[in-house]
Amino acid sequence: MDLQRRLSRILILLCWSAVSACSHPAPTQDSTAGRPPQDWPAKMQRLSAVLTNLMPFVASPKKFSAEENFEKIEKDTAELKSLAHSMKTGEMPNNDPSMKVVSQLFDEDLGRALASLKNGNRDYARRILSDTTSYCIQCHTQTKNGPEFPRLTLDFQLKDLKPLDRAEFLAATRQFEPALESYKQALSETELAKSDSFAYEAAARDALGISVRVHKDPNEALGLIKTIEKNKALKPQFRKSVSAFKKSLEAWKKEKPSKTPRSALEELTQAEALIASAQKANSLESPQDMVYERASGLLHDLLQRPERTDELSARALYLSGLASEATRDSSFWTMHETYYEQCIRVKPMTEQARQCFAKLKDAVEVGYSGSSGTNVPADVQKRLEGFRALAFGEK
């Protein structure tokens, strides 16, 4: 990742921090209902300030490895870890489940970064700190829920960014309409598709994700497909994938929309049917990303419905994990392991929890497999055993 793209993602995280307090708050029983927790804006301001101080060092391997900067870097990382932990354990400013997920992962990653600094593994710590800035886009493009932010008071000139960097920033701050315009510009760039096909293909999937998950609009998504198809520098395999995406979108366009509001159970049933059909049809030649994306949008909406039961939530989390895992190349970061973990927490000692644990165990082991076999670190194995105990009722 080049410096400009890293810095743009840093600003994405700062922006998420600054605007999170504006999101719709979870209902409470006191006179402060409708307001975010009183200390949330202060936490976000301090988080932004510390990140602003720390990230110039993260962006420069030379500065990060300079001994005279060790104390400051460790001090700022420790403060970030403290802030992240207070965010994770404190009251959230809204009822969007992604907020809790982001806070949890932010806290865990910063814990690893701090431990690596103390152990002298500075290169690894710097990579972790850099990666923590990549969390926002998938969370903020899961669904239409949450506010869009047409104006942001940040010292940042969007016009100076390349179209793809601008698109990522706008998507992470829920400015979906201008984000799509910037994505279209990026997807029209022959040079981007030629020189960085991975970034181009990820951008295509992210843009389509906004149209499918957020706007739930097959016509808008098909318009993006036209833009992508016109790019003459597409890799042959991705061109085949785009054809499969187009086929899925055209089939969706022909469906008749429901005329009456549906219950949470009906939405869960539809999402489950979509995932089952995607699993059956998915292949290298015919990827079913658009079908999985549709299911993801339905499930994320369902997880915010007040009438949902724990049983419905656990099943929705399991299905969300399946969809996220199936499309894990479509964004900077995916949440399938966290969905499986949350499923176990919501309904421990149930068949659903055991099903989620099986998927979690497989995902973890795949992540630590290589030519030398499977080597799961002791701390990760300990965490996994904790979820096994929750799922099976073991002590």
Image: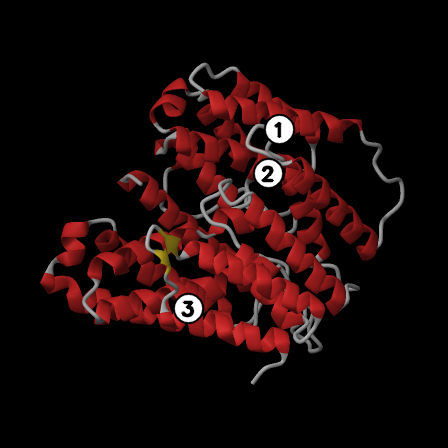
Q: Choose top left, top right, bottom left or bottom right for residue 52.
A: bottom left
Dividing the image into 4 quarters, which one contains the N terminus? top left
Residue drawn at the location 36% of the way across and 43% of the way down:
8
Q: Is residue 351 left or right of residue 321?
A: right
Q: Nearer the viewer, mark 1 or mark 2?
A: 1
Give coordinates of residue 161: x percent, y percent.
36, 33
Q: Is residue 141 left or right of residue 380?
A: right
Label 2 and label 3: CA atoms lie apart by 33 Å
- Dot 2 corresponds to which residue? 210
Residue drawn at the location 44% of the way across and 74% of the way down:
382
Label 3 environment density (alpha carbons within 10 Å; few <14, some 14–19, many ≥20): few
Amino acid at dot 3: Val
Which mark is drawn over residue 245?
1
Dividing the image into 4 quarters, which one contains the C terminus? bottom right
Amino acid at dot 1: Phe
Q: Is 151 placed above or below 100 here?
A: above
Q: Is 34 placed above or below 319 here?
A: below
- Residue closest to the far front: 372
Q: Is residue 360 left or right of residue 193?
A: right
- Sequence-first tag of 2 and 3: 2
Residue drawn at the location 67% of the way across and 35% of the way down:
281
Confirm or deny contact between disc 3 and disc 1 (CB under 8 A): no
Which mark is drawn over residue 380?
3
